[in-house]
Amino acid sequence: MKDGYGIKDYHLDQIKELGCSLVITVDNGITARSEAKHAKEIGLDMIITDHHKIVKGVPEALAVVNPQIDDNYPFKDICGATVAFKLCMALAEKQGLEKQDKKIAFERLLPFVAIATVTDVMPLIKENRLIVKNGLRLMNKGRKRLAPSLRQFLIALNIKDEVDTYHFGFIIGPRLNAT
């Protein structure tokens, strides 16, 4: 791994050079205070989605979405993918996406969030239990409705039978993380 964990100033510079005006982090950024400051200095908006605990204050960004910074959020033990998923679904709602399109997005993304919940070793209680239960249900009730990339991935892994949390944690998740 060349770059290690987290976003770096030169990543932000490269993104800005590509003509982008917004960066959204997933499962990192809560400790990127200097990088968030750099993004602002070069005219790059930053939305940070993370689930890790705050160490020395919240970075200055366009938005920071993290259950650890909201005392009213009822369940803090969600993974970073869940935080990003919730942001995506909120944006879909805000943009007025049709009900059927939101359902398709939900059903295509939820299995990935379920895999991430298991592979990030989150406690399988409360919200996480529902995510994994419904992600498994979606994966097993009809693979034709899965995201094409996930459907092809299951074929490549030769997973033909019903998927369970073992598959998430020891077969699918590790191979997704290796790509």
Image (tube, helix red, strand yellow):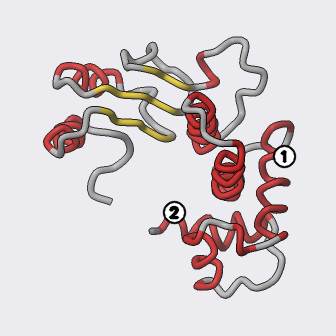
Question: In the rendered view of the protein, which quadrant contains the C terminus?
Answer: bottom left
Q: Who's the residue at 42% across and 32% down the image?
A: 29
Q: Which dot marks residue 177?
A: 2
Q: Is residue 51 visible?
A: no
Q: Is residue 2 above or below residue 37?
A: below
Q: Is residue 7 above or below residue 68?
A: below
Mark 1 lies on residue: 129
Residue 27: give x, y in percent of width and height. 51, 40
Q: Who's the residue at 66% across and 45% down the image?
A: 102
Tell me the amino acid under the disc marked 1: Arg
Residue 78: give x, y in percent of width and height. 69, 37
Q: Is residue 150 above or below residue 85?
A: below
Name, please, the residue furthest toward the left.
Answer: 17
> SS class of the residue under badge 1?
helix
Tell me the amino acid under the disc marked 2: Asn
Q: Is residue 110 above or below residue 80?
A: below
Q: Tag 2: Cα neighbours inside 10 Å, few (<14), some, or many (≥20)?
A: few
115 vs 65, left or right, is: right
Q: Who's the residue at 54% across and 66% down the image?
A: 176
Q: Who's the residue at 34% across and 49% down the image?
A: 4
133 vs 113, left or right, is: right
Query: Where is residue 66, by image quadrant?
Result: top right
178 vs 98, left or right, is: left
Find out whether the residues at labels 1 and 2 contact each other: C-beta distance under 8 Å: no
Question: In the rendered view of the protein, which quadrant contains the N terminus?
Answer: bottom left
> SS class of the residue under badge 2?
helix
**Of callouts 1 and 2, which one flags the residue occurring earlier in the amino acid sequence?**
1
Q: Is residue 137 visible?
A: yes
Task: Quote the CA–CA distance across marks 1 and 2.
Answer: 22 Å
